Image (cartoon, helix red, strand yellow):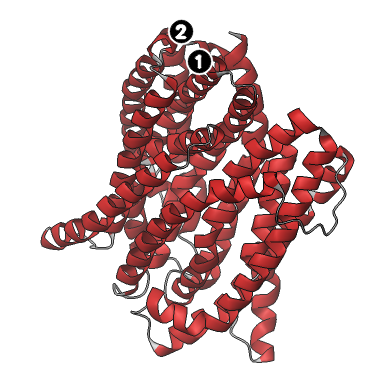
């Protein structure tokens, strides 16, 4: 009983901070949609931001984080704090040199890169995307440094501030839009460049806000070049196989971007907003659980305790089902009202809402699998196994590329928006990856039957599906009672619908009597 409570306590700390960041992310998207709508300007930003964001998966939220935390934890446990601080400084030094050079390459090569990534863009749209890409070129370095800071603080038991740090990115983008959009035209500059300026400054701020907390823990930032350090090389070797997995992901995103760029103005923005909405529960719950889980399993791996590792992983998977499955079905049931309330203002019109809501549905079908994969992949890194997640990534991405063309063709014949096929294929790939990783973990750690993972997931699946039906019915029933398209009426209908879903869920959780449910209800 103490285990789910302890895990939920950590998850709550991370989730509360992440919630602030994700809500600010929605506000950022709202401000962006209000000023620029969904068209050529926002598509150019999506394409430009995608280039450093691709590599971010490797250096910020992917292999580097998963390789650094177990190695840093082992150094701290076995050789003491000074050795761990030295490793952090050596990694930061290596990142500044390597990613600084890569950022310069992105700056100089932006026109050629975008000719591949956004082949369907016209000349004006292409020129804007190139300018934005050059402004965003340092972003990769900034977020990589922020990821190192996050790993250090998480290992020291500090979760709230690192989870809150991304909020500074959203704040900078919002301020840049509000402040710079009126000013830039007077200087003869395209106002949409405010998006890129804010994103680049926000990436730097993500790292800087964590430095004082690291200093209080005993860390002192200094240049320390030691490429032969065994711990640093271990991080590098753990990352090498993941580079091949990233290459597969890059091919996937390349295909998505090229295809979306050929569907006219808007689809890239619709997909971006929809994916962001799907990532809200993943960020609040999935990433929070994954962060807490990585710290625990890294400590277990450092002591060679596979029994504790299996027990902690099982607890994380059960908590994930309790938190993310209701979010998945709730988002599916209320996708159109949510998009309408959040984004249908200013330049964002009802057609944009309908097409974005369709993408939300397609992405949401893979939400649970996507969230659980965030927990599974770092567990393999803690075990020193990079091969299994990389092969899973290659397999799922290959399936997605094939599914892209199949779904696009089918949707065209059914007279639906063909770009929705890209989102559907993403969900399919998430489930394939989830299945592959689940089989791999069973082989590495053994079955988790005694920990009730499957039974908890099945119970939550049924309960969450019923909850989705309830909230959809309540929202439809409220249409004639609380009519109108005003913001107050929309908030009223949506608020009552969500409240009814939460009440239904709480009653169901109480009836199920799961340990995680009891711990959650107690909080």
Residue 167 shows in the view: no
Residue 64 in the figure: left or right of residue 376: right
Q: Nearer the viewer, residue 324 or 24?
A: 324
The residue positioned farthest toward the left in the image shown: 413
Task: Pick the quarter of the image with the C terminus.
Answer: top right
Q: Which mark is residue 256?
A: none
Marks 2,1: beta carbons within 8 A? yes
Q: Residues within 10 Å of mark 1 (few under 14, many from 20)?
A: many
Compared to 246, does 71 lie above or below?
above
Q: Position of residue 235 (x, y in %)?
A: 62, 47
Q: Residues within 10 Å of mark 2 (few under 14, many from 20)?
A: few
Q: Which residue is mark 2?
A: 513
Q: Residue at point 62% right, 15% down?
A: 5
Q: Secondary structure at mark 1?
A: helix
Q: Position of residue 485 (x, y in %)?
A: 42, 53
Q: Nearer the viewer, residue 57 or 334?
A: 57
Residue 133 shows in the view: yes
Q: Which residue is mark 1?
A: 517
Compared to 41, does 89 lie above or below?
above
Q: Position of residue 305 (x, y in %)?
A: 58, 18
Q: Residue at point 28% right, 62% down?
A: 419
Q: Nearer the viewer, residue 223 or 2?
A: 223
């Amino acid at each position: 009983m103490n285990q789910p409570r302890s895990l939920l306590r950590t998850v709550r700390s991370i989730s509360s901070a992440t919630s602030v960041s994700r809500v600010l992310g929605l506000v950022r998207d709202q401000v962006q949609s209000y000023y620029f709508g969904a068209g050529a300007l926002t598509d150019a930003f999506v394409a430009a931001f995608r280039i450093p964001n691709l590599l971010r998966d490797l250096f910020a939220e992917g292999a580097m984080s998963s390789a650094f935390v177990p190695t840093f934890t082992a150094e701290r446990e076995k050789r003491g704090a000074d050795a761990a601080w030295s490793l952090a400084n050596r990694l930061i030094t290596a990142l500044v040199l390597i990613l600084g050079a890569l950022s310069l390459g992105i700056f100089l090569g932006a026109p050629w890169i975008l000719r591949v990534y956004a082949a369907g863009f016209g000349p004006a749209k292409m020129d804007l995307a190139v300018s934005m890409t050059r402004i965003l070129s340092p972003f990769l370095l900034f977020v990589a440094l922020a990821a190192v800071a996050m790993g250090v603080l998480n290992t020291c038991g500090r979760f709230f501030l690192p989870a809150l740090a991304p909020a500074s990115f959203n704040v900078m983008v919002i301020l840049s839009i509000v402040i710079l959009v009126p000013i830039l035209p007077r200087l003869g500059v395209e106002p949409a460049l405010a998006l890129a300026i804010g994103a680049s400054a926000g990436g730097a701020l993500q790292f800087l806000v964590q430095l004082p907390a690291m200093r209080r823990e005993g860390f002192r930032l200094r240049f320390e070049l030691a490429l032969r350090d065994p711990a640093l090389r271990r991080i590098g070797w753990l990352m090498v196989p993941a580079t091949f997995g990233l290459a597969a992901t890059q091919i996937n995103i390349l295909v998505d971007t090229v295809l979306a760029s050929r569907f006219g103005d808007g689809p890239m923005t619709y997909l971006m907003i929809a994916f962001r909405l799907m990532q809200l529960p993943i960020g609040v719950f999935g990433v929070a659980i994954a962060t807490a889980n990585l710290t625990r399993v890294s400590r277990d791996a450092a002591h060679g305790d596979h029994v504790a590792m299996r027990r902690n992983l099982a607890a994380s998977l059960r908590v994930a089902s309790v938190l993310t499955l209701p979010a998945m079905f709730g988002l599916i049931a209320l996708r159109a009202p949510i998009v309408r309330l959040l984004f249908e203002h200013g330049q964002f019109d009802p057609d944009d809402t309908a097409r974005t809501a369709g993408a939300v549905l397609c992405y949401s079908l893979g939400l649970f699998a996507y969230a659980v994969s965030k927990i599974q992949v770092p567990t393999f890194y803690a075990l020193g196994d990079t091969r299994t997640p990389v092969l899973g990534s290659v397999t799922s991405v290959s399936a997605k590329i094939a599914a892209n063309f199949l779904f696009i063709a089918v949707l065209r014949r059914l007279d639906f928006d063909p770009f929705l096929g890209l989102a559907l294929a993403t969900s399919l790939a998430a489930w394939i990856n989830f299945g592959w990783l689940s089989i791999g973990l069973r082989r590495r750690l053994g079955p988790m039957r005694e920990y009730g993972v499957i039974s908890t997931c099945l119970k939550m699946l049924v309960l969450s599906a019923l909850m989705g039906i309830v909230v959809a019915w309540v929202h439809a029933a409220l249409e004639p009672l609380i009519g109108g398209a005003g913001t107050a009426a929309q908030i009223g209908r949506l608020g009552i619908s969500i409240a009814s879903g939460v009440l239904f869920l709480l009653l169901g959780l109480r009836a199920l009597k799961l340990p995680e449910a009891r711990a959650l209800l107690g909080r």
